[in-house]
Amino acid sequence: MSKQLSLGKISVSNPKVWVVIGVTVAGIVILAETRRRRLRARKLEREDLGAFIERFELLPFPQPLPPAARHLLSGLTFAVKDIFDVKDCVTGFGNPDWKRTHEAAGKTAVVVTALLKNGATCVGKTVMDEFAFGITGENVHYGTPTNPRMPSHIPGGSSSGSAVAVAAGFVDFALGWFARDPSILHRVGHILLQLNPVEPRRTRCFIIADDLFQLSKVPKQKSIQVITRVTENLSGYQPPRHVNFGQYVAANVPSLRGFREESMTLQDGISTLKALSSVMFLLQRYEFKTNHGEWVKAVKPRLASDVADRVNAAVDATHENVKTLYKVRTEMRAALRSLLKDDGILIFPTVADPPMKLNSKKGLSAEFHDRAFALLSIASMSGCCQVTIPFGKHDGCPISVSFLAFHGADKFLLDTVLDTYSSLQEQVSLVSHSSPVPDTNGHMDASELLKEKVCSLLAYL
């Protein structure tokens, strides 16, 4: 016997029926609207590579009347990291619970206002690591900005959105501090740091940290070759000097000895820099707990697992040796002042390793972590000013070299970058197409020598 499906009659005069129909229709509308918003968000993310948390426009202050000169940043656009206040917007600090529990800013940050007063237009806020507590640029709440040069890899942080916005050409510069060319960096620096436009010209000496290049994938001899050629072709530059930076720090920062670990696998100088980075972390935890510990305990914010580990470590720390930590920082600043004097600029690789793959299950390995923070701790623990300069590619990855000048020498450093940038990029291009060169002891970099032999072998096949 076949089963028949029969439809009963529905009385549309029954109010319960209308309630059911209304709820059903409303649910369909809500689902459709949610889907539309998600698609729109994905489209916007594709358009701006996920760099922005919020898009808006803050117009610059009016231009002065002629014959006065136009504002220094006229026609330029910029974005701000989600750590700077903008009036009537809630500063999110990279975390939605922070944003939820804080009021909108009553006024715009001084640095943002200074840029607006000088003619620039602000176009939005950018993604960052939660609480600036990371270097990968990943954010589980707002998404990770896409690295425009290597889309399958992390963008780097903590100012990942700002970096991507500049690298992709969405803005001319961004806070925390990136610029598409040294001229813009120079102008923005003079405004934000309130530097004198004129300063007596003095000679410059590049000091190359040989041991730090040994940490890195950056070919040391190619970098040295670029620096040497530039100093030969520009007036006012002394021949480069060389230093084992780790050994120098070990000898001149005595309070660091108590933080060193005895290791059979680390060279003496590198062990010192690992100790320096450990002091940097302890200070970071102490200052984070002092400023935000009570908020963390009260709100219990949702955090990415790696960020949660760092935040909990900060909140739970006892900090019994804070005075010693600050003493290390004071000694480090004095040591760098003594090394660099008035004319020195330390040269070292910005990062030690290529960027990690996105969504890497391994996370930061101990080796990656130690090498990265050994380099990052130098400016952090000395208060020195640092500028990162692109140095072409190596094995398909963009590489960069950092210039670091003594504390307070911001104008000296910005002038040096502006003075040398074109020559540096010209020499980077020439060296990248040239044969490997011997090092100062007549030896060729091992990886480069292997490539040379392979190329020679292929020539005979």
Image (cartoon, rainbow, N blue to C red):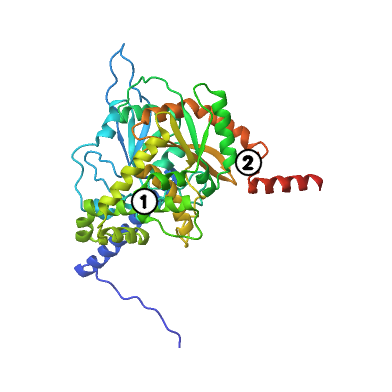
Task: Please give left or right for residue 240 compared with residue 249 in the image.
Answer: right
Please tell me how crowded label 2 is: few (under 14), some (14-19), or many (20+) other residues with Cα within 10 Å: few
Residue 439 visible, this angle: yes
User: What element does badge 1 sit on?
Assistant: helix
Q: Which residue position is annotated with label 2?
A: 441
Image disc number at residue 79: none
Q: Amino acid at mark 2?
A: Asn
Query: For the N terminus, which image quadrant?
Result: bottom left
| Residue farthest top in this picture | 67
Instruction: Depth check: give the residue in front, 110 or 117.
Output: 110
Tell me residue 254's x, y (percent): 36, 48
Image disc number at residue 256: 1
Q: Quadrant of residue 107?
A: top left
Task: Please give left or right for residue 393 compared with residue 300 in the image.
Answer: right
Tell me residue 116's x, y (percent): 29, 29
| Residue farthest bottom in this picture | 1
Please tell me how crowded label 1 is: few (under 14), some (14-19), or many (20+) other residues with Cα within 10 Å: many
Looking at the image, is 399 positioned above or below residue 232? below
